[in-house]
């Protein structure tokens, strides 16, 4: 006791020091505790939660693409993608073997995917397998193997309408065609949800949806799949028969400017496109331009009629079958002598049309072509749409003006040419071209008078007659108006002598046109190359089928047996 | 005392609500799954329908198996109303 008493006396100072230190340390601990528990609470709890709660993306449904009658052109169906975390994937050899066979992967590929190097934690084994297969894989219950829901795009129409519809890539983004043009409308918004995961990244529980995925919208195109198939079939047959390099067909509805069909050759199947060159993907009808050649002649005539310089029965002397313009010569196949305008178109006389073209002032011819839509894009919002070219008239020489009147020296796409023909078909009105069924936004322009359009149409009917160049474009029971073109292809430094485009542009029924079709066959190389022999028969077959499918009554009388019923007797 | 009881009641309420919301969420997940399955099946059926009714297939069947042909122009009779209307 004495000892302790002495110590008590001796160490008062030390005891106080110790006590203060202890209190101080306690205060610090308390302060830190308050700091963590109260002040930093939010931040730290968030950190803690992030160890086991994660937000993961939920893929959204991509809208369907339909034709005007609601037939499917593209649809997304849910599928599963298999991925592994190689760090956790520890299947036995047997399991690996059966998984590999089930997914159809090669030994080498499989082992490189499951390789543990680089600390990889996410590797797709196989994307987009059917839900049925996925269920089988799930049953194997392998560790470190996961399934994610994704969507796969199917194109039931396959190669028939692929150039128009386009396709998506493996991440469901539009790559070509309408899929690309309307990506934002179709795609929808990816959602996300919160899940609780254990240390091995297994999802234990779904907690809540942060954002529901917003499904994309459906898109209804203006094309009619029945007509599209018809166009595809006939175009393909001609493409093969004439051993062409490429072929294009555009069908427009008169009065609305809607695209009814748009086919291209060569084509491909968007559902399995491996090892395909990019040049097959192009929608040539919209992206590729060519010189329209003789198919421009009706417009040169229409421009002259519009100016009142000529009337439909004016006579023009085309002899001797050549015409010197500056230092160049315009030539006809032979000397046609004096012709009226109808016969100039019927015989497709370059000299006659040149005389008509040269009688116009350059600016009025330019203005007229420009109003018909040459030189600027159609504006349907299709990716890679071509503008075509039409030189400013200030830079024209007289020979250029002559060549422009028979369709050289300017260029346009098949769609542009078809649009210009709708002006002749539709009483001089130009409608904006539309790809969507419900696109009603319309700013119609009167490009020429209804009478001028009707006059030219009457002349073009004579082209599709036994005396004209396009008798093979005729459709029994219907009056058809149209114009052939056999265009020499432009090469660097001049025009080719053995490479041609066979073109036909026309409309039916001529008395009251409903449909305009343009057919372009690029480099037919099986002998025939005239537009009237190569392109016109395709026009005839497609037009025939289209008129029948659309239920358009024939306007050519006397060739058909006819039963007339009185109004009262009709049903 | 009253406050204490109220706190207890509210706490129990929170627990119950949380439990209930999780239950509902699980239910929703199940329904979502079901919806997915229906969606998959609907897609499959639509595809099947389009494939079976594809124009190419129908045409081949009609021409080859059934021997159908397009009527030639001689075998078509057009029936029109007496005062023929414009188009």
Image (spheres, coloured by chain):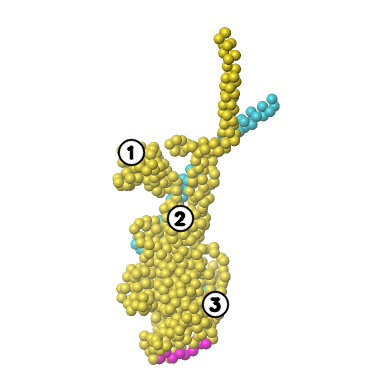
User: What type of secondary structure mainly makes up the magenta span?
Assistant: loop
Tell me which residue sits at (40%, 62%) in the image: A281
Task: Label 3: state its secondary structure.
Answer: loop
Q: Earlier in the sequence, mark 1 or mark 3?
A: 1
| Quadrant in the picture for residue A226 | bottom left
Mark 3 closeness class: few <14, some 14–19, many ≥20 residues within 10 Å? many
For disc 3, the marked residue is A447
Residue A133 x %, y %: 38, 44
Tell me which residue sits at (45%, 85%) in the image: A398
In the figure, is residue A185 to the left or right of A157? right
Mark 2 closeness class: few <14, some 14–19, many ≥20 residues within 10 Å? some
Verify whether residue A431 appears in magenta: no
Tell me which residue sits at (57%, 35%) in the image: A41
Numbered circles on residues, count = 3
- Disc nearest the viewer among 1 and 2: 2
In the figure, what tint was chain A given? yellow
Question: Is the residue A144 above or below the residue B72 in the image?
Answer: above
Verify whether residue A316 appears in magenta: yes
Q: Which range is magenta? A: A309-319
In space, the residues marked 2 and 3 are separated at their CA atoms by 40 Å
Question: Is the residue A74 above or below the residue A296 in the image?
Answer: above
| Residue A230, numbered label | none
Residue A514 x %, y %: 50, 72
Q: Chain for mark 1?
A: A
Pick the front one: A355 or A115: A115
For disc 1, the marked residue is A95
Q: Return the residue found at the far left.
A: A107
For disc 2, the marked residue is A173
Q: Earlier in the sequence, mark 1 or mark 2?
A: 1
Q: Return the residue found at the far right.
A: B2
In which quadrant will I find the N terminus of chain A? top right
């Amino acid at each position: 006791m004495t000892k302790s008493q002495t110590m008590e006396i001796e160490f008062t100072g030390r005891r106080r020091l110790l006590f203060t230190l202890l209190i101080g340390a306690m205060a610090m601990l308390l302060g830190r505790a308050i700091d963590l528990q109260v002040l930093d609470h939010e931040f730290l709890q968030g950190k803690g939660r992030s160890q086991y709660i994660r937000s993961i993306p939920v893929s959204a449904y991509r809208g369907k693409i339909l034709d005007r009658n609601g037939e499917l052109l593209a649809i997304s169906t849910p599928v599963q993608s298999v991925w592994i975390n190689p760090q956790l994937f520890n299947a036995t050899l047997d399991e690996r073997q059966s998984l590999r066979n089930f997914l159809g992967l090669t030994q080498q590929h499989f082992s490189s995917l499951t390789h543990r190097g680089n600390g990889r934690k996410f590797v797709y084994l196989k994307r987009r397998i059917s839900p049925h297969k996925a269920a089988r894989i799930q049953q194997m219950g392998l560790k470190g193997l996961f399934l994610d829901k994704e969507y796969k795009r199917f194109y039931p129409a396959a190669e028939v309408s692929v150039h128009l519809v386009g396709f998506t890539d493996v991440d469901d983004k539009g790559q070509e065609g309408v899929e690309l043009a309307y990506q934002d409308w179709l795609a929808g918004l990816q959602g996300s949800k919160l899940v609780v995961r254990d240390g091995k990244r297994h999802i234990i529980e779904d907690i809540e949806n942060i954002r529901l995925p917003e499904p994309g919208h459906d898109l209804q195109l203006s094309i009619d799949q029945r007509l599209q198939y018809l166009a595809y079939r006939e175009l393909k047959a001609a493409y093969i028969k004439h051993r062409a390099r490429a072929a294009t067909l555009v069908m427009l509805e008169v009065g609305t400017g809607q695209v009814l069909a748009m086919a291209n050759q060569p084509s491909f199947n968007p559902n399995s496109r491996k090892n395909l060159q990019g040049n097959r993907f192009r929608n040539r009808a919209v992206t590729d331009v060519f010189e329209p050649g003789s198919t421009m002649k009706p417009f040169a005539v229409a421009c002259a009629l519009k100016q009142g310089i000529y009337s439909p029965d004016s006579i023009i002397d085309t002899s001797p079958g050549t015409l010197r313009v500056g230092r160049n010569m315009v030539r006809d196949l032979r000397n046609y002598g004096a012709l009226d305008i109808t016969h100039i178109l019927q015989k497709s006389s370059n000299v006659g049309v040149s005389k008509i073209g040269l009688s116009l002032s350059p600016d009025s011819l330019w203005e007229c072509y420009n109003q018909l839509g040459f030189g600027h894009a159609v504006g349907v919002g299709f990716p890679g749409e071509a503008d075509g070219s039409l030189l400013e008239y200030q830079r024209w020489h007289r020979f250029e003006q002559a060549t422009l009147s028979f369709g050289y020296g300017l260029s346009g796409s098949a769609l542009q040419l078809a649009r210009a023909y709708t002006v002749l078909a539709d009483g001089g009105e130009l409608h904006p071209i539309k790809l969507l069924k419900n696109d009603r936004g319309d700013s119609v322009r009167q490009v020429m008078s209804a009478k001028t359009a009707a006059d030219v149409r009457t002349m073009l009917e004579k082209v599709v007659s036994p005396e004209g160049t396009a008798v093979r474009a005729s459709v029994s029971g219907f009056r058809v108006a149209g114009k052939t073109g056999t265009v020499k292809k432009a090469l660097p430094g001049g025009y080719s002598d053995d490479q041609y485009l066979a073109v036909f542009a026309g409309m039916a029924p001529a008395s009251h046109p409903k449909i305009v079709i343009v057919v372009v066959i690029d480099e037919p190389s099986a002998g025939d190359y005239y537009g009237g022999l190569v392109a016109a028969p395709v026009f005839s077959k497609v037009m025939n089928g289209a008129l029948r499918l659309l239920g358009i009554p024939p306007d050519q009388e006397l060739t058909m047996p006819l039963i007339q019923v009185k109004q009262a007797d009709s049903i | 005392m009253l406050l204490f009881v109220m706190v207890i009641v509210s706490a129990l309420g929170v627990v119950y609500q949380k439990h209930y919301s999780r239950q509902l969420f699980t239910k929703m997940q199940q329904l979502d799954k079901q919806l997915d399955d229906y969606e998959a099946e609907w897609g499959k059926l639509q595809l099947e329908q389009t494939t079976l009714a594809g124009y190419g297939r129908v045409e081949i069947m009609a021409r080859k198996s059934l021997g159908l042909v397009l009527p030639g122009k001689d075998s078509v009779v057009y029936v029109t109303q007496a005062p023929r209307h414009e188009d």
